[in-house]
Image (tube, grey):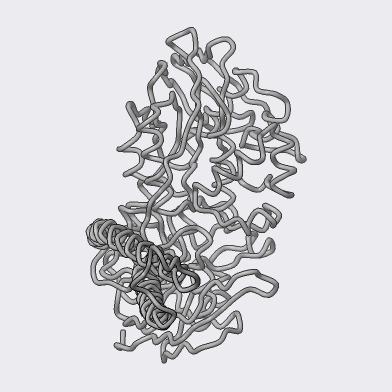
Amino acid sequence: MTLAQILVDHLTFAYEGSFDNIFEDVSFAVDTNWKLGFLGRNGKGKTTFLNLLLGKYAYSGSIITSSAFDYFPYAVTPEQLQLPAAELLEQWKAGCEPWRVLVELDQLRENAEVLYRPFHTLSPGERTKVMLAVLFSRENDFLLIDEPTNHLDQESRGNVKNYLASKKGFILVSHDRDLLDACTDHVLVLNRKSIDVQNGNFSVWWENKQRRDQFARAENEKHIKEIGKLRQSAAQKAQWADQNERTKIGFDPVKEHDRSISTRAYIGAKTKKMQSRVSQLQKRIGREIEEKEGLLADLEEPVELKLMPLRHHRERLIHVREFTAAYEGSARPAFSNLTFDLMQGERVALHGENGCGKSTLIKLILQRAGMGEEAREACALPGLQRNGAQLPVRESGVCETAAGLVISYISQDTSMLKGSIQAFCRAHGLDESLFCAILRQLDMERVQFRKNIEDYSEGQKKKVLIAASLLTPAHLYIWDEPLNYIDVFSRMQIENLLLAYQPTMLFVEHDVRFREQIATKTVEFL
């Protein structure tokens, strides 16, 4: 790639009708041969910035570059889903040469036959690899890669990670710490009140940030003490000035025989000087506060979340022995001969490649636990359908849940989320004020509460599901890929919550660092 720069100068942007600017007077520069990790809280404007680079929105300020951009993922229409990727190459990337795509697929360890199957038949990992192969099939483009590992299993994530680690000249939006560490050499970070561009990967940036935050806290403590002393001095001098001011008018000639009317002018001048000193102190306090008020603006001080796990009278909550499930008409079972127990206090991770039956098992467990009709509809079993009707599942073996088990469930699907926050809380029997408080603790702005949930970003929708789960007292928390689209800071916040409260959990999560931190036991799907 030819070395060039992208210069962003005094960029300001807000969506039409929005209350706040997404970017305000932002300036920075990046080189186009960098492997740039792009970080920030959900809703901070990462995808918006990529769209600004693509020229999709009008803005004030300037973005100066000689580079051509291309964006992952490519949009796929319902009609295109029926076609093989080989017929979509030119539509996705003008001038795309098939042989270059095949070379990139080989680097991704993917068989060329995926180009010739209808696109809708490809797994999430296969779709991602095909699109990345097309994206990197031409030199000298600067590539905008938006969350490529969502919904991918560990093997597919590993292939994507190794592939991107061998490339350069891209911006990578991701919340996967393992991916960011392996694939980036610079970071662009949307802080709370500023933007950082730094050399190094996520861990290097995070370590530096923690040191800066610690220094900022120490400086702020000193600053608070200095301000306190200045305020005390100003209050004392103001009191003296008031006392002097009161002595200007009227005096007792017997008690104050050494004072005359002319003394009034002297007292007035002295009081004026004292008031001037008070005014100067107040201005100094104001300057001190103004100088320091930005000190803590970018601190990540995640609020400690709370959880209300219930205690069940039985120690064993789920018992699975040689359990097999298969959809009617399917050539092979969703999973077979699965054996494990989930004991109270355990956090069990279900681990395996996409399509191995993890979500199927979860939803069979939910059905056995006797969840309400609305909940059963929300987690309808995935699988084969005929004429729009769900095919039944054949089962053998044992799958039992404890009687009276209360479950709090997070689905990996957010498509059912619609309407206002108020309507969502009413439908799920949640206290609206507590629900919004949890969303605020997950760093969602209050202005978002005025929108309909379908207008939220995917990360914000996931936070709605997480907040609802946290607010639901339960014996067992079942979370199916809860962290897709969730920002790095919220992931660490949720990790701290689960380690502090240690609820009983059954979960699926492909973020390897989250799984290593949280799981007390892993059930492998072969």
| Depicted 309 relative to depicted 329: above or below | above
> What residue appears at the point 50 percent right and 47 percent down from the top-left corner?
441
> What residue appears at the point 35 percent right and 47 percent down from the top-left corner?
155
Q: Is residue 253 visible?
A: yes
Extreme-front residue of the structure: 254
Quadrant where the C terminus is found in the figure:
top left
Quadrant where the N terminus is found in the figure:
bottom left
The percent coordinates of residue 121 (x first, y second) are 57, 51
In the picture, measured across the screen, residue 37 lies left or right of residue 481, that is left
> What residue appears at the point 49 percent right and 70 percent down from the top-left corner?
250
The percent coordinates of residue 439 (x first, y second) are 55, 47
Residue sitting nearer the eye, 353 or 86:
353
Residue 416 found in image quarter? top right
In the picture, measured across the screen, residue 200 lies left or right of residue 409, that is left
| Depicted 39 relative to depicted 397: above or below | below
Q: Is residue 202 visible?
A: no
| Depicted 227 relative to depicted 122: above or below | below
Residue 292 found in image quarter? bottom left
Residue sitting nearer the eye, 246 or 195:
246
Residue 396 found in image quarter? top right
The percent coordinates of residue 199 (x first, y second) are 24, 71
> What residue appears at the point 76 percent right and 40 percent down from the top-left corner?
388
Extreme-top residue of the structure: 313
The percent coordinates of residue 26 (x first, y second) are 45, 80
- Count of numbered labels shown in the rendering: 0
Residue sitting nearer the eye, 47 or 330:
47
| Depicted 26 relative to depicted 526: above or below | below
